[in-house]
Amino acid sequence: MNDTASRASDIRVDLLEIARVIEPGSTVLDVGCGDGSLLDYLVREKQVDGRGIELSPEGVNKSIAKGLSVIQGNAEEDITFYPDQCFDYVILSQTLQAMKRPDVMLEQLLRVGRKAVVSFPNFGHWRVRLSLGVFATMPVNKTLDYPWYSTPNIHFCTIRDFVNLCDQLDIHVEQAVAINAKGYPLPFHKLFLANLMATQGMYVITKK
């Protein structure tokens, strides 16, 4: 196995899908970068000039141990200090639903970056609907992996909700990817099918 394949196997498949849309050599801010797995991959494999913000001290320590430039902070507060259009891409992976104001966060992402890459768990997936409709319980699964009483997720949304919000904020969807439970893209281009079958959505967005 070559070094690239080995490093790719160390991060989640859905993160590789995000990495696929990032242009080599670009400037990147990863908001809520966790342990730095995606940012590390982008720096090594796509030679990006990468920065990160992470709330948890554990995530920051793991990122710094990888040699990454990551600061500890509250993304919603700290992103306001970045200048306009100072990054080519701003990434928000599996974090939008934990924001107090997802709408404001999207606007900030596109103020700071020329493009934003946003992924989020899809609350419209058929298993989520089944859990609510048949069992009358909040779902717990691979993507939504916290019980309702301890989850950091405070604003669940569906893929359709996200698309509607982009319309309201006059945001252009440049690319949309429906992702299954294993992290692989689905061949669905219809919003209805993506909203029903995808466990998460991944969007590349820009200002109109």
Image (cartoon, rainbow, N blue to C red):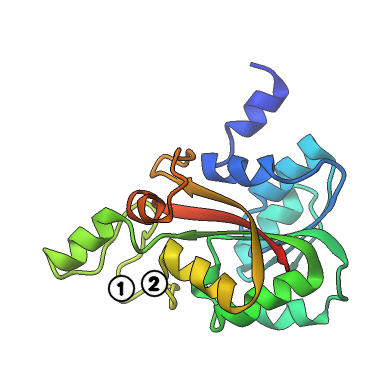
Q: Residues within 10 Å of mark 1 (few under 14, many from 20)?
A: some
Name which residue lies at 80% across and 71% down.
112
Residue 45 visible in rendering: yes
Name which residue lies at 37% across and 60% down.
144
Residue located beneath label 1 in the image:
148
Name which residue lies at 63% across and 82% down.
104
CB atoms of marks 2 and 1 within 8 Å: yes
| Left or right for 139, reference 5 | left
What secondary structure is found at the residue carrying circle 1?
loop
| 145 vs 103, nearest the viewer | 103
Name which residue lies at 49% across and 55% down.
201
Give the vertical position of 89 relative to 10 (above or below).
Answer: below
Amino acid at dot 2: Thr
Q: Residues within 10 Å of mark 2 (few under 14, many from 20)?
A: few
| 187 vs 65, nearest the viewer | 187
What secondary structure is found at the residue carrying circle 2?
loop
Q: x, y percentage for residue 48?
A: 83, 46
Quadrant for the C terminus in the image: bottom right
Q: x, y percentage for residue 47?
A: 85, 40
Distance CA(mark 2)–CA(mark 1): 6 Å
Residue located beneath label 2 in the image:
151
| Left or right for 102, reference 147 | right
Amino acid at dot 1: Trp
